[in-house]
Image (cartoon, helix red, strand yellow):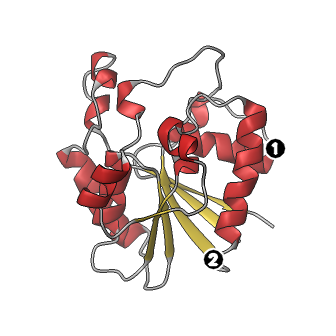
Amino acid sequence: MELIFIRHGQGEHTLNLPESLHMDNPSLTIQGRGQAKNLRSSLPLAAGDVLIVSPTFRTLQTALIWSENIECNRWVHPMVAPRIFPTRLAATTLPCDELLDFERLQDEFPTFAPAPNLTSSLWVTGINVLCEDEFTLLAEEFIDFCRSFQRERIYIVTHDGTITSYRQQISGQQLTREDFLLETEYFHLVVE
């Protein structure tokens, strides 16, 4: 199975650092919307494809724009929510990385289904500050969730630290922040 991790388009929280990191639920910028639209030609989706998205506004916007008019399977999963990389003890989640609550998710993104059978705490806290051991266990469960679709390829719209965490976990390579993808760049990982 091939997992294709895509970083979301440019978000408003990146425009006036570090102050903008304290925005709640930042949207895509105009440039970010254009980047998401460009995914249609650089990484076209087809009917029946599986698209898994982080429960943040900017990732859901990216996925919605990219998948417009495509009858694909759209899921939201907290195991691809924002993640600090590298992990730091005593780190806290910034407002820009807080997860959307269920009500807003359902109201604004009704074509995306929440992943089933997860603990409610994961929907609240996400994976941002999980220790490596806990992340490793949950990452295996997430990969099993991906396998359950029995597809050759799964598309995942997520965040730079999350992508790098999965890349390191799956490949066994030691990575750094220098390995972060740019907006709407993508990375293929093969999982046996």
Whether residue 173 is visible to the viewer of this picture, yes or no, is yes
The residue carrying mark 2 is 149
Q: Amino acid at mark 1?
A: Gly
Please say if 143 is above or below 91.
below
- Please state the horizontal and vertical placement of residue 43, each as a whole percent of the image: 44, 69
Please say if 120 is above or below 74.
above
Q: Nearer the viewer, residue 7 or 120?
A: 120
Work out which quarter of the rendered image holds the C terminus and state it. Answer: bottom right
Question: Position of 39 compared to 162: left or right?
Answer: left
User: What residue is shown at x 51% (from left), y 40% (from top)?
Assistant: 160
- Please state the horizontal and vertical placement of residue 74, each as a whole percent of the image: 43, 70
Choose mark 2 or mark 1, whichever is in front.
Answer: 2
Mark 2 closeness class: few <14, some 14–19, many ≥20 residues within 10 Å: few
Residue 172 has which mark?
1
Q: Amino acid at mark 2?
A: Phe
Please say if 16 is above or below 33.
above
Question: Position of 164 compared to 24: left or right?
Answer: right
User: What residue is shown at x 64% (from left), y 26% (from top)?
Assistant: 86
Among all residues in the image, which is located at the extreme left? 30
Residue 121 has which mark?
none
Cα–Cα span, label 2 and label 1: 25 Å
User: What residue is shown at x 79% (from left), y 40% (from top)?
Assistant: 173
Q: Nearer the viewer, residue 78 or 186?
A: 78
Work out which quarter of the rendered image holds the N terminus and state it. Answer: bottom right
